[in-house]
């Protein structure tokens, strides 16, 4: 770990101020977090540029970004996982991370490709993008379900639950960054809380 002494470097403090100004400008124009904003957050965190104002990333997030540290880290994790294109799509049509995961195979650089047609991720294409994404997210046509017993259904759900739990454990074991591990633990806690809700 290296400590960046920005207090002694007025140019570094100025650069941090410019980045914070850019972040506020982005937020005021878009009304929500954009890829450019999150890239600035990531740079501030990774280069420890916040240390010119406070020694704690958590305090910097709360005081200067008006975000919780956890939310800032979550946004940076989304940027690392999906890249800037997720934020572009999110601004255009409001896709969630879960929805993006479902459509990710159809996303190629700055285009959405569906049925051989490439749709550029630009505001003018918002209606076409919304229609294409609705199509991608639509549940598949249901085939007639053969009658199964309650015990068979329970066994099938249990198998899927175990598979999902094992996948989370494997992801946690292979994850090397703290933010990714925190995200996995958040998901596991959310699932546990759902299971414990009284019916």
Image (cartoon, rainbow, N blue to C red):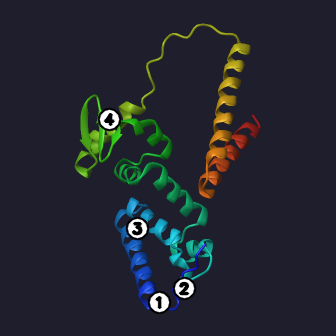
Which label was assigned to residue 5? 2
The answer to which of marks 4 and 2 sits earlier in the sequence is 2
Q: CA distance from mark 3 to mark 2?
A: 28 Å
Per the image, label 4 sits on a secondary structure element best described as: helix
Q: CA distance from mark 4 to mark 2?
A: 50 Å
Residue at the top extreme of this rendering: 147
Mark 1 vs mark 3, foreground winner is 1
In the visual, does 119 lie left or right of 18?
left
In the visual, does 3 lie left or right of 138?
right
Q: CA distance from mark 1 to mark 3?
A: 28 Å
**For residue 141, what is the image quadrant?**
top left
Find residue 71 and report its horizontal and vertical position in percent. 56, 61
Q: How many marks?
A: 4
Marks 2/1 in contact by CB < 8 Å: the verdict is: yes
Q: Residue at x 54, y 85 (%)?
A: 5
Residue denoted by label 4: 132
Per the image, label 1 sits on a secondary structure element best described as: loop
Marks 1/3 in contact by CB < 8 Å: the verdict is: no
Marks 4/3 in contact by CB < 8 Å: the verdict is: no
Mark 4 vs mark 2, foreground winner is 2
Mark 3 vs mark 2, foreground winner is 2
In the visual, does 33 lie left or right of 77?
left
Which label was assigned to residue 9? 1
Q: Residue at x 27, y 39 (%)?
A: 128
Residue denoted by label 3: 27
Per the image, label 3 sits on a secondary structure element best described as: helix
**For residue 147, what is the image quadrant?**
top right
The answer to which of marks 1 and 3 sits earlier in the sequence is 1
The answer to which of marks 3 and 2 sits earlier in the sequence is 2
Q: Is residue 27 above or below residue 196?
A: below
């Amino acid at each position: 770990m290296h400590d960046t002494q920005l207090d002694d470097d007025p140019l570094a403090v100025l650069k941090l101020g410019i980045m914070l100004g850019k972040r506020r400008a982005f937020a005021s124009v878009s009304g929500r977090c954009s890829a450019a904003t999150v890239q600035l957050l990531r740079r501030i965190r990774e280069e420890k540029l916040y240390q010119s104002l406070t020694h704690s990333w958590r305090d910097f997030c709360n005081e200067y970004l008006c975000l919780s540290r956890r939310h800032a880290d979550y946004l940076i994790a989304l940027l690392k996982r999906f890249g800037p294109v997720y934020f572009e799509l999110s601004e255009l049509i409001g896709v969630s991370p879960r929805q993006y995961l479902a459509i990710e195979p159809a996303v190629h650089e700055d285009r959405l490709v569906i049925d051989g047609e490439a749709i550029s991720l630009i505001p003018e294409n918002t209606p076409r993008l919304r229609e294409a994404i609705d199509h991608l997210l639509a549940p598949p046509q249901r085939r007639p379900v053969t009658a199964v017993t309650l015990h068979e259904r329970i066994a099938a759900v249990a198998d899927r639950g175990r598979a999902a739990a094992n996948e989370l454990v494997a992801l946690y074991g292979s994850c090397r960054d703290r933010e990714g591990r925190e995200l996995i633990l958040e998901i596991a806690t959310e699932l546990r809380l759902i299971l414990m809700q009284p019916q």
